[in-house]
Image (cartoon, grey):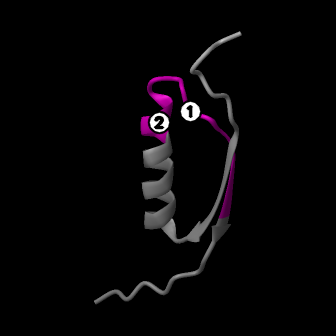
Amino acid sequence: MNVGIQSYEMRIMFAGGDDTVGWVLGCLGEFNKEETSPITHVGIITLCQRVLVG
């Protein structure tokens, strides 16, 4: 029995464009550096964004 250690599972669903996806996945990568990330499932809903050029 591990006293003081909680075990839990986290699932994340987010929606956004390229910048949002990059930002969220970058943050999740920071959690995973220590290999203690409780995140096991990630869902991405892509949204169309209009890019205005020049």
Residue farthest toward the front in the current orientation of the protein: 3
In the rendered image, which quarter contains the C terminus? bottom left
Residue that appears at 63% across and 70% down: 46
- Where in the figure is residue 17, as x and y percent of width and height? 52, 71
How many residues crowd mark 2 within 10 Å: few (<14), some (14–19), many (20+)?
some
Gap between marks 1 and 2, in whole Å? 5 Å
Residue type highlighted by circle 2: Phe
| Tally of numbered discs | 2
**Above or below, comparing residue 2 to residue 46 in the picture:** above
Q: Residue 41 falls in which quadrant of the image?
A: top right
- Where in the figure is residue 31, as x and y percent of width and height? 47, 36
Relative depth, front residue between 6 and 31:
6
Residue that appears at 48% across and 55% down: 24
Please, what secondary structure does the residue beneath circle 1 have? loop
**Above or below, comparing residue 1 to residue 51 in the picture:** above
- Where in the figure is residue 38, as x and y percent of width and height? 62, 35
Query: Is the Cβ of the residue at disc 1 closer than 8 Å to that at disc 2?
Result: yes
Residue on which the image places disc 1: 37
Mark sitting on residue 7:
none
Residue that appears at 54% across and 26% down: 36
Q: Inspect the magenta stretch and tell me whether residue 49 lies in it.
A: no
- Where in the figure is residue 16, as x and y percent of width and height? 55, 71
What are the residue bounds of the magenta stretch? 29-44
Q: Residue 44 falls in which quadrant of the image?
A: bottom right
Q: Residue 33 falls in which quadrant of the image?
A: top left
Residue on which the image places disc 2: 31
Residue type highlighted by circle 1: Ser
How many residues crowd mark 1 within 10 Å: few (<14), some (14–19), many (20+)?
some
Q: Inspect the magenta stretch and tell me whether residue 37 lies in it.
A: yes
**Above or below, comparing residue 43 to residue 8 in the picture:** below
With 19 as the anchor, is 5 left or right in this view?
right
